[in-house]
Amino acid sequence: TDYFSSISGLEQLLHTEHTLMSELSSQLDATRNTLKQLESEVTAIKLEHAMAAKGLENYLTNPINIYRLMKRLHTDWQQMERRVQQMSTQIRFNITQHYGLNFPSQEDVDGAALALVRLQSTYKLDVAQVAAGILNGIKYGTDMSWQDCFVLGQQLFEMEDYNNTKVWLRESMERLRRHQQPQHQDHSAPEPTILNSMEMVAKSLFQMGDFDTAYELSQRVLELDPSRIRNWHLSAKAANVVQGEIGEVAQSRHADGGYRLTQEFAHYEKVCRGEVSASAAQQRPLRCRYARGQHAYRVLAPLKLEEHSLDPLVVSYHDMLSPQQIIELRQMAVPHMKRSTVNPLPGRQSKKSAFRVSKNAWLEYDTHPMMGRMLRDLSDATGLDMTYCEQLQVANYGVGGHYEPHWDFFVDSQHYPAEEGNRIATAIFYLSDVEQGGATAFPFLNFAVRPQLGNILFWYNLHRSLDMDYRTKHAGCPVLKGSKWIANIWIHEATQTFARPCDVIRDNEVSLGYDIIE
Ligand SMILES: O=C(O)CCC(=O)C(=O)O
Ligand SMILES: [Fe+2]
């Protein structure tokens, strides 16, 4: 059920682990008690034997001692045997059958690995730092163990992401090396299963021609268990490496990820990192100002308007929702949250995609009076008519969650009812702050807006001529630390004739050319 795509499901997983832990602990406690009893009985018998050793004859001529020896061997040891047997049946620990708990699927684990790798590449994070629980210089959590790093590397290998495989395996080996140094207490030999995996991965790397990493890995295996040298005569098959095959495999992973290799995508990532400054020439300097809106009471409570771009118009309205309202809204959405999908071609099923990792729920405006108020406030601020707007979409991005660059208008008119028209404008209500990452980025306009609880981000997707404005391509940057909540309202073009009349001339030429990916 896509636990990795948002935070709400993760709480269930924490609960799962909590249950497992207390179950195993109580089982261990019970066994520990039996063990302790058995141990004290053995100690008592040892004491008897020590006494006997001091003077055998003396000991064995005592009728009590003789009786007890007899009794021990005739009944006590048999009981002992039964108790030990019982102990092994006493421990009942079957994680999947008994407790009806939720577990992540392979897809979840893959999703979490992808998220980590996405963050690392978008925000140019140093692997060693990530493994140490440090994000952009801030230490948040526990270190990853060398095994954690290894399993992640192995998984990336299975997902055919070879560049990242290499960095994570190397980090794992580095951590293992440090782990083995004398000042470390824990020198217990690793499980044979992990040594087997290490050997397997090393062999695959060797076959693929990554000799350095393969060598490094096999050296570590041999340090941990020198007897494994027997596994290391090369099979004839391994020696016959066909280099051509590797290229194919490495490319196949980009079959549907071609966009991520473009200049445009690299630029988008820069915008997410805040490495570009807004460039687009504006007709006048941008301002933060008070605005009246459409309603008389705004004379007393003016809107706090922040301009991000004048053409196309992108603005923020500050402090439009109270924290209390936001909590309610989020709570209403939670029971309905499902993994987000991307718009399918007409007539096709919508599908999940690595392109958009979040969960969302659609809410009717009459669910709660507050939602009607949101619509009225939005209409009041923008002057637009809300007759044809879509239901409220509440979305939550977990760590690593994102929405790659896209347009909100539909390129294909089959996607919207003709009488409603296309999505003329988008309003995003930010329902949370985000500690790091998670900005709404406009790569062609060279800026990104940081989520700020209670603010609305608003822009026009269409020109006044109702042609598509390709400059409005935007994205939700990956969340690096925190959880991002938004509510979207998409407003359609019909009924806006008077609110946003056409210009005398067609105004769409400026945006042509932005629809081609470079
Ligand atoms: O998450 C964001 O900041 C952008 C969301 C978005 O573009 C969308 O839901 O269409
Ligand atoms: Fe969007």
Image: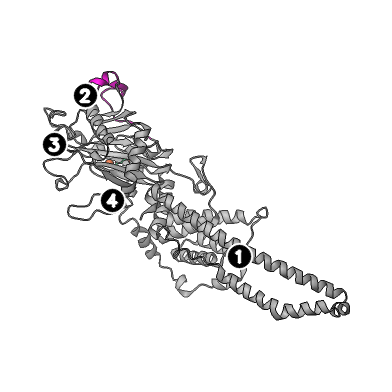
Other residues around mark 3 within 10 Å, as few (<14) / some (14–19) / many (≥20) = some
Which residue is tagged 4? 341
The relative height of residue 481 versus residue 73 in the rendered view (above or below) is above
Q: Quadrant of residue 472?
A: top left
Hey, what amino acid is under mark 1?
A: Thr
Question: Within the magenta stretch, is there residue 291?
Answer: yes
* Residue stretch rendered in magenta on the structure: 276-300
* Of the image marks 2 and 4, the number of the one nearer the N terminus: 2
Mark yes or no: residue 405 visible. yes
- Judge: label 1 CB < 8 Å from ligand 1: no
Q: CA distance from mark 4 to mark 1?
A: 49 Å
Estimate the x, y position of residue 499 in percent, counting from the top left: 16, 28
Q: Residue furthest top?
A: 299
Q: Number of labelled discs?
A: 4
Side (left or right) of 151 relative to 367? right
- Which residue in the structure is indicated by mark 2? 294
Element type at mark 1? helix
Q: Residues within 10 Å of mark 2 (few under 14, many from 20)?
A: some
* Amino acid type, mark 2: Gln
C-alpha gap between disc 1 and disc 3: 72 Å
What's the CA distance linking mark 4 and mark 3?
Answer: 26 Å
Q: Is residue 82 left or right of residue 284?
A: right
Mark identifier at residue 494: 3
Q: How is the image coloured?
A: one colour
Determine the quadrant in which ligand 2 lies. Answer: top left
- Position of 343 with respect to 247 (left or right) is left
